[in-house]
Image: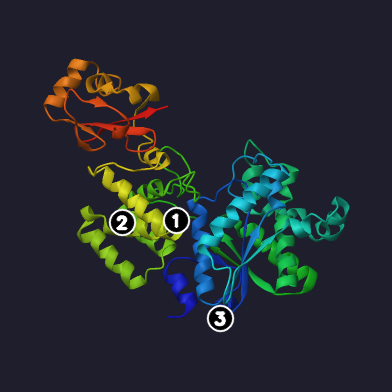
Amino acid sequence: MNFYQELEDRGLIADVSNPELKELLNTKKISFYIGYDPTAKSLQIGNLFAIITMKRFQNAGHKPYVLLGGATGMIGDPSGKSTERVLLTEEVIKENIEAQKKQFQKILKFDGENPAIMVNNYDWMGKFSFLEFLRDVGKKFRISEMIAKESVKKRLESEVGLSFTEFCYQMLQAYDFRHLSLNHDIILQMGGGDQWGNITAGIDYTRKMDGRQVYGLVIPLVTDSNGNKFGKSEGGTAIYLDPEMTSPYQMYQYLLNSEDASVVKYLKYFTFLSLDEIAALEAKTVNEPHLREAQKVLASEVVKLVHGEEGLNAALNATKIFFGEKITNLKDKDLTAIFKDVPSVELKRADLQAGIPLLDLLAQTPLFPSKSEARRSVEQKGVYLNNDTMPEMTTAINESHLASETCMVIRKGKKNYCVIKFA
């Protein structure tokens, strides 16, 4: 199977600027780029689709350039946004860039044969004065064409409107394309479907200035079967690639909860499994949906790619905990991530050091309204400490009963948990 055909079979191509690109990708090794504005400390799982697509191209021998928007990040791309971004300081953007670099380095190969390259558009944009930019770049853009871009039209028609700052964004991105074309022989810009207007602006600008033929390719925006944007948890929290912001366990659970109607698409987008392997998982989803085999493979493949074997093992161990495995020797941050959605109480560490009578401890949690209720549950063998059998009624709970540096977990019945933190 040729490379372009596999991209099509995986559903990775939403649009291309020129059909010639198909032949180029199959017969030559080209340089291409995708731009990322460092508007946050961490990339999100929605960004991961584009990074994995870059890796797919790199594996096929094409040379990837990661453009970090040290300049464009100070403006904010209006594409796909209903409101204007909060403007960030130069210092915050530099911090975000350094943090995001590490995330790219986990997935793309930056050494050896055909290494990926990182560039920062502040290196060339920062040298422009406003007058120079208007003369050298702005002169080549027509207002009528800029307004016709879909991302601009939507914002102009909204109540929020569009600032002049955001309106100029497509000129900055267009200049990036031309600069990279001239200085790095890049002939292809890729991005999400909402980037089509910016990408075609760069194609037109490069043609006008240099007569060079460059190309654009956009991948689909990732959504569920209801059209909701991929990458947000049920509570609306973004799923980040930074393990301090979204633990491997949380990422694993998010992917594990993928609906049957979307999981095959996600496997094609986010994994390097062959299409035959994915077809086999699709058959299991139809014939044995209760096993959720496709979701398990998706979650494992993505977490391993982003967080390595160690991160995947941590996620799998955390998952076992909710099926009753004993909780022991965890780190606070891992235990907190696992039980972030369950009730918690904070008690004094000094009291724990002295020893707390079991029933006194249980009565201080929201699981038990009184000592008598706690006693009754313990007698009925319905209470667990760190998913293990509860000690004798007369036991004094102390530091030896901690499941992590400062926490222990009480469970009532099968699913009612409470975390007790000792500070």
Q: Earlier in the sequence, mark 3 or mark 2?
A: 3
Q: Is residue 36 above or below residue 41?
A: below
Q: Position of residue 125 (x, y in %)?
A: 77, 56
| Residue denoted by label 1 | 307
- Quadrant in which the N terminus is drawn: bottom left
| Residue denoted by label 2 | 296
Q: Amino acid at mark 1?
A: His
From the viewer's side, name the closer residue of 334 and 239: 334
Q: Residue furthest left?
A: 380
The quarter of the picture where residue 375 lies is top left
Helix, strand or loop at disc 1?
A: helix
| Residue denoted by label 3 | 23
The quarter of the picture where residue 267 lies is bottom left
Q: From the image, state whether disc 2 or disc 1 is nearer to you.
A: 1
Q: Amino acid at mark 3?
A: Glu
Q: Residue at x 24, y 60 (%)?
A: 286
Q: Residue furthest front?
A: 354
